[in-house]
């Protein structure tokens, strides 16, 4: 028996607590805070379906560095999934050859709830943050890393003079994220602002529409540089905003400082796959010393019809980006947008399933 203990919802920590791993002979998990987890109850509450995957990877720290190429998979809503589903999906995609998952840390689109590890003030939503604690440990176990993404519109902001907004909440979110996970090997990339390209006269980026001005980008990078970490930090850019061109938009937002990695979202027109590599090479040439990860190529679903793009486009994207010297390329899919009820793996359309099945034959 355990006296004076608080029983925690097993859905938060599942089979183990990422903080201590201490069990007594009766299967009761006790930690220094007097918290208890009952192993048999947890097993009944969260049935697991183990998927064999590769062993631990000694090279997570090298992902997205010179001479490497890491295929990634979009699992935006991973943090809203029950823990067993999240682990099952990560294991399946890892076994298929993907070494990284792009996960939004503040995903709240398309009616999805329960995927925010940070609230609008930049503070932790602790049950979800603890789920990410567990998934970081699991990433080490199977050799899977994370590209964590934020969007500027996900945090409160306050109009002011100069370049438009006080973004204390967004900066708090960046600092909290890096302070908690920044030294963990599976955390390889932080995209501080999805599609942050500047919009509006004078470059006054407005966080309430998801965009960031050059001055605000400098503030975010200054916060990131103040925290000890292993991961690479930047913002993703698309052909929107002031220029219909990714390179020009990157140059605009980098007026005062530069990111540590380039995360382009190039245009989505027929023939996009073969164009990804050369476009990425041109971007890298414009920013010597920075590597390119093709974080969000074209996808099937939502803005396009399911199955619209043929397998050949995706094949060309992976092959052209690797040949051009990029450090990664992502299979962008809406299959992971809402994982509350179904595995992302089971939501892949027929074309995406072929891509997953073929990936290992496309890349060295």
Image: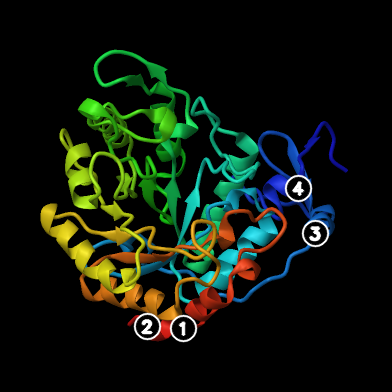
The x and y percentages for residue 202 are: 21, 26
C-alpha separation, residue under disc 4 versus residue under disc 2: 40 Å
Q: Which mark is residue 47?
A: none
x then y, percent, for residue 16: 67, 53
SS at circle 3: helix
Dot 3 or dot 4: first in sequence order is 4
Closer to the N terminus: mark 4 or mark 2? Answer: 4
Query: Residue at 65% of width from left, 41% of height from top?
Result: 113
Q: Is residue 123 left or right of residue 320?
A: right
Give the CA distance from mark 2 to mark 3.
Answer: 39 Å
Query: Mark 3 to mark 4: distance in Å?
Result: 9 Å
Dot 1, crowdedness within 10 Å: few (<14), some or many (≥20)? some
Which mark identifies residue 358? 1
Q: Are marks 2 and 3 in contact (CB under 8 Å)?
A: no
Camera-side residue: 137 or 64? 64
Is the residue under label 2 in contact with that under label 1 (CB below 8 Å)?
yes
Q: CA distance from mark 1 to mark 2?
A: 7 Å
Report, in whole angstroms, how far the alpha carbon at label 4 lies from the one at label 1: 37 Å
With respect to residue 45, does 310 lie above or below?
Answer: below
**Which residue is denoted by mark 3 in the rendering?**
43
**Residue in front for this viewpoint, 18 or 80:** 80
Residue that lies at the very extreme toward the top in this rendered image: 161
Q: In the rendering, at what x and y percent does residue 165 appear?
A: 34, 20
Q: Residue at x 25, y 66 (%)?
A: 326
Residue at mark 2: 362
Q: Is residue 330 visible?
A: yes
Is the residue under label 1 in contact with that under label 4 (CB below 8 Å)?
no
* Near-viewer residue (164 or 3): 164
Q: Residue at x 39, y 80 (%)?
A: 312
The residue beneath circle 4 is: 10
Q: How is the image coloured?
A: rainbow
Q: Are marks 3 and 1 in contact (CB under 8 Å)?
A: no
């Amino acid at each position: 028996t355990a006296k004076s203990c608080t029983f925690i919802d097993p859905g938060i920590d599942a089979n183990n607590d990422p903080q201590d791993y201490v069990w007594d002979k009766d299967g009761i998990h006790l930690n220094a805070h007097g918290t208890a987890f009952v192993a048999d109850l947890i097993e009944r509450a969260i049935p697991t379906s183990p998927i064999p995957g590769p062993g631990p990877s000694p090279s997570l720290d090298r992902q997205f560095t010179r001479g490497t190429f890491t295929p990634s998979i979009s699992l935006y809503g991973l943090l809203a999934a029950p823990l067993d589903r999240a682990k099952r999906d990560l294991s399946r995609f890892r076994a298929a050859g993907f070494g990284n998952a792009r996960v939004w840390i503040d995903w709240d689109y398309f009616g999805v709830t329960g995927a925010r590890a940070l609230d609008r003030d930049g503070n932790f939503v602790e049950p979800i943050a603890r789920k990410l604690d567990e998934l970081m440990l699991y990433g080490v176990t199977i050799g899977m890393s994370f590209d964590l993404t934020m969007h500027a519109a996900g945090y409160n902001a306050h109009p002011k003079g100069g370049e438009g907004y006080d973004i204390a909440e967004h900066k708090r979110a960046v600092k909290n994220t890096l302070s908690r996970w920044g030294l963990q090997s599976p955390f390889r990339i932080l995209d501080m602002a999805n599609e942050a390209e500047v919009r509006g006269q004078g470059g006054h980026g407005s966080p309430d529409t998801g965009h960031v001005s050059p001055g605000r980008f400098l503030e975010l990078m200054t916060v990131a540089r103040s925290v000890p970490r292993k991961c690479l930090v930047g913002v993703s850019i698309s052909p929107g905003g002031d220029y219909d061109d990714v390179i020009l938009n990157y140059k605009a937002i980098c007026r005062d400082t530069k990111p540590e990695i380039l995360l382009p979202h190039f245009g989505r027109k027929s023939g996009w796959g073969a164009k990804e590599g050369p476009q990425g090479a041109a971007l890298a040439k414009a920013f010597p010393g920075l590597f390119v990860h093709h974080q969000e190529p074209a996808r099937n679903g939502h803005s396009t019809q399911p199955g619209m793009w043929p397998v050949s486009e995706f094949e060309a994207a992976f092959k052209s980006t690797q040949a051009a010297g990029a450090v990664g390329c992502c299979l962008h899919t809406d299959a992971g947008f809402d994982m509350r009820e179904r595995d992302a793996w089971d939501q892949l359309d027929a074309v995406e399933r072929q891509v997953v099945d073929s990936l290992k034959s496309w890349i060295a």
